[in-house]
Amino acid sequence: MRVFLHSRSLHGISAQIPILLPTGIYYIVAMDFPVDKEARIIDLPKFLDSRGNLSFVESSNQIPFAMKRCYWIYDVPGGELRGSHAFKKQHEMIIALSGSFDVLVHDGKRKQRFSLSRSYYGLYLPPMHWRTLDNFSTNSLALVLSSERYDEEDYLWDFDLFLREAACR
């Protein structure tokens, strides 16, 4: 069970307690993260303040894995792609800290496109999801949180091989 503070009521979550803080109403939310096999957007905590807003991620609280590595992608030239691979066991969350970009995700059966442009939304990617990042805006910054340290053996760079391995799962 995870408990966290959220800036708005979350539909479908019954365990919510509203509290009033000087900066507004927030909700104490208790929920179990499912053992997820699907890519999905996760709302991150957002604290609105006239001095500037604040969002955060705590390993295993807002994300359904323990974080072991963090990296970021920036200064991507117009028209370039990033990613174009899958991981065998690694979970990731991708956040657009600045600007915007799209993430094309393939789970071995279907494709989805996620447009990221807000720093309080993270795209969760479980293992065996092919991802390609594209449509980077000027000065965009992608933050990637990972469940594993860098391991070249965990990468699948060949899409046809990925499809064969995904079909076996």
Image: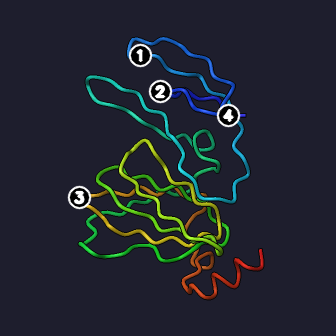
Q: Is residue 8 above or below residue 156?
A: above
The residue wearing badge 1 is 24
Amino acid type shown at disc 3:
Asn
The residue wearing badge 3 is 139
Quadrant for residue 130, please give it.
bottom right
**Nearer to us in this view, 136 or 74:** 136
Q: Are marks 2 and 4 in contact (CB under 8 Å)?
A: no
Q: Are marks 2 and 3 in contact (CB under 8 Å)?
A: no
**Gap in angstroms between the C-alphas marked 2 and 3:** 27 Å
Q: Earlier in the sequence, mark 2 or mark 3?
A: 2
Q: Are marks 3 and 1 in contact (CB under 8 Å)?
A: no
Q: Earlier in the sequence, mark 3 or mark 1?
A: 1
Q: Position of residue 150 (x, y in %)?
A: 55, 69
Q: Is residue 40 above or below residue 23?
A: below
**Gap in angstroms between the C-alphas marked 2 and 4:** 16 Å
Q: Secondary structure at mark 3?
A: loop
The residue wearing badge 2 is 7
**Gap in angstroms between the C-alphas marked 2 and 1:** 8 Å
Q: Position of residue 43 (x, y in %)?
A: 51, 41
Q: Is residue 51 above or below residue 165?
A: above
Q: Earlier in the sequence, mark 3 or mark 4?
A: 4
Q: Which mark is residue 2?
A: 4
